[in-house]
Amino acid sequence: MRTTYRRWSAYPYQGEQSPPTPYPSAAYYPMFFISRGETKSFLDPLGNQINWEIKNPSGVNWDSELLLVEQTLSRLTPQQIQIANYWGNSETTENMTPIIFHLAKKYRLGSPYIARILAYFHAGINDSFVISWYLKYLWDVARPNQYGRNITPILPTPRFPAYPSAHATVAGCADAILSYVFPADATDIKNTMEQCAMSRLYAGVHFKVDNDEGLRLGRQIGGIVVNVLKRQSFNSFG
């Protein structure tokens, strides 16, 4: 069992000679619902320190994770390839925002309500990206194609560390927020967001644990946003 892991910044991508070049700037963007405390801590809107609900990568069995990537890529179905391309060839929110407009039309919501939903949604997504980037560069976990195992991804491997998956973190946040706003549609929303996360395994650019733990982290961030909505007596629909 390999619990130590390769560092993204120390190994070249498959077919390359030098390790990739980091650009962690997004880890320091301003946030809306989360603030930075002292000694690299983060605070919720009430000023309480946040303990992130994500597994430390040192506790992950990376041998099993690598095997799972290889097995997944060796038996991909046409539907899984389609899912990988759907979520990987556009911005994640490009595929998520139409869900909001569809549900807004379903429940006949007015423009002010729609504007508020979009504002909270995208502000939460912003914070999800920042935290995922912070943890990516904090832990510096290598991608599957940095283990020298002749892995052929469906899509190009992004040039930043793997853990946690940003797609999955964003999807988890979207799940929490939209399921609160549209509770009658929570099952469909959850299934869609979990598909988004799993698409990165199908693409061959992430380990499954990147996606599982990213979802968990994103749902925690989304929960912080939902707590703000509850304090402001924001109505849910459905």
Image (spheres, rainbow, N blue to C red):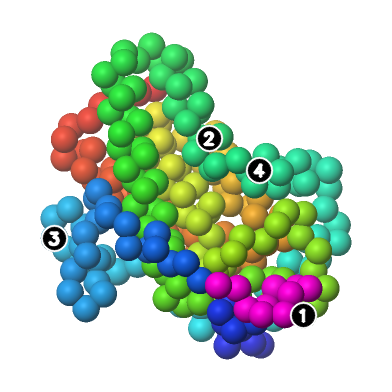
| Residue type marked 4 | Asn
CA separation in Å, label 2 and label 4: 10 Å
Secondary structure state at the residue bearing disc 4: loop
The correct choice, above or below, for 77 with respect to 59 in the image is: above
Dot 2 or dot 4: first in sequence order is: 4
| Residue type marked 1 | Gly
204 sits left or right of 139 in the view:
right
| Residue type marked 3 | Gly
Magenta residues span 12-21
Secondary structure state at the residue bearing disc 2: helix
Q: Which residue is mark 4?
A: 89
Q: Which residue is mark 1?
A: 148
CA separation in Å, label 2 and label 3: 32 Å
Q: Is residue 17 magenta?
A: yes
Secondary structure state at the residue bearing disc 3: loop
Say the numbered circle drawn on residue 47: 3
Residues packed near mark 1 inside 10 Å, few (<14), some (14 to 19) or many (20 plus): few
| Residue type marked 2 | Glu
Dot 4 or dot 3: first in sequence order is: 3
The correct choice, above or below, for 17 with respect to 199 in the image is: below
CA separation in Å, label 2 and label 1: 34 Å
